[in-house]
């Protein structure tokens, strides 16, 4: 009996801590302002490299919605016809979303090149009226589907998407599922449609000080992919994407970090990678379906 009480107590404490960190994130790196800027930054790579790229009246699929739901909303503000956002787990939190949305100061200015002031306010008011409940977001053309098997969804869904997008998601996919997931996600893209992903290659445990320390762990288990990342390096990802002849792929942004020492004890598998490859800690990939 005592053991059960201790277990319940620990679960409650963990939930309180998780909730606390979600709300901090909603005010900081997952705030509406920051995430709007991130999306515009990613879209600029597609716009600059593919002259016919546009969001207006397009069908968008986001893989990996997360908790805050900013990117689907911004796609809609940018003029998307319909946005479907899917997640392997039911992560969306009305409370975290509310905090993220309510703290916006600069997003209206950031988005002003794409949407008029009055339209922006009107749409945000409608979002507020849903009380951030995902089943009501559908009224606004934003559908949330979770939990979902992404591979199955992409293969079975009848309509194709003009844009398939993700932000800090693919590094969490289990290594053994990556080929099938990328394959299925590309299958879901319409002819002439686009793929746009940002993949974060840092060890999520201590990205600032120990960005690739997960390459030193002999006891690595794929299950840590969810928490710390799946450890694929840039060269692995580029091979995954570049084997598709029916897509033009570019990697317009990759960050090479030189501010850390390569840790000792890198496991054999990663010793054959070049130092430059090990130092690439994130990248944007844009693809366009040719046929
Ligand atoms: C770091 S969060 C990013 C969420 C959101 N894109 C954001 O930036 O706030 C990663 C998300 O990917 C989801 N995810 C992980 N593997 C997935 C998969 N195979 N298919 C769909 N979503 C997945 C997780 O459940 C989680 O919500």
Image (tube, rainbow, N blue to C red):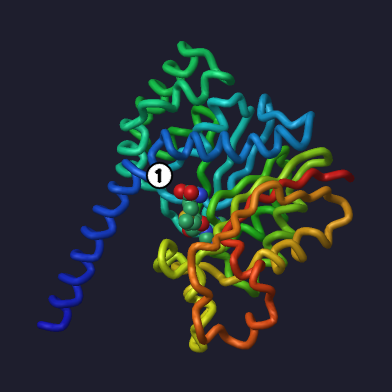
Which residue sits furthest top?
118
Residue at x 44% of width, y 27% of height: 107
**Residue 34 appears left or right of 38:** left
Task: Indicate if the residue with disc 1 has its beta carbon within 8 Å of ligand 1.
Answer: yes
Q: Position of residue 248 (x, y in %)?
A: 83, 48
Which quadrant would residue 215 be assigned to in this image?
A: bottom right
Q: Nearer the viewer, residue 274 or 48?
A: 274
In the image, what residue occupies the spot 70% across and 47% down?
252
Query: Splitting the image into 4 quarters, where does residue 159 fall?
Result: top right
Would residue 1 be visible to someone looking at this image? no
The residue tagged 1 is: 30
Q: Front-most of 100 and 85?
A: 100
What residue appears at the point 30 percent right and 42 percent down from the top-left corner?
Answer: 95
Along the horizontal axis of the image, is 129 left or right of 82? left
Q: Quadrant of the N terminus?
A: bottom left
- Relative to residue 64, is residue 2 drawn left or right? left
Say left or right for 176 vs 222: right
The answer to whether any part of residue 288 appears in the image is yes
């Amino acid at each position: 009996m005592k053991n059960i009480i201790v277990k319940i107590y620990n679960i409650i404490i963990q939930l309180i801590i998780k909730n606390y960190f979600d709300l901090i994130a909603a005010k900081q790196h997952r705030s509406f302002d920051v995430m709007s800027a991130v999306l515009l930054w990613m879209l600029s790579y597609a716009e600059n490299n593919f002259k016919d790229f546009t969001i207006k009246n397009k069908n968008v699929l986001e893989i990996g919605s997360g908790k805050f739901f900013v990117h689907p909303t911004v796609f809609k503000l940018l003029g998307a016809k319909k946005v479907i956002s899917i997640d392997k787990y039911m992560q969306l939190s009305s409370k975290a979303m509310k905090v993220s949305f309510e703290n916006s100061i600069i997003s209206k200015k950031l988005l002003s090149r794409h949407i008029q002031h009055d339209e922006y306010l009107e749409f945000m008011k409608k979002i507020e009226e849903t009380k951030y409940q995902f089943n009501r977001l559908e009224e606004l053309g934003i559908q949330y589907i979770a939990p979902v098997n992404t591979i199955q969804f992409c293969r079975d869904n009848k309509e194709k998407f003009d844009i398939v997008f993700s932000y800090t998601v693919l590094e969490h996919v289990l290594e053994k599922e990556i080929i099938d997931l990328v394959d299925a996600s590309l299958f879901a893209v319409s002819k002439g449609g686009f793929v746009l992903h940002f993949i974060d290659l840092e060890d999520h445990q201590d990205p600032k000080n120990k960005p690739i320390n997960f390459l030193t762990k002999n006891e690595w288990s794929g299950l840590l992919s969810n928490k710390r990342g799946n450890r694929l390096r840039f060269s692995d990802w580029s091979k995954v994407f570049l084997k598709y002849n029916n897509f033009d792929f570019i990697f317009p942004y990759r960050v090479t970090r030189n501010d850390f020492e390569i840790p000792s004890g890198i496991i054999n598998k990663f010793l054959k990678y070049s130092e430059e490859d090990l130092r690439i800690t994130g990248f944007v990939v844009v693809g366009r379906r040719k046929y």
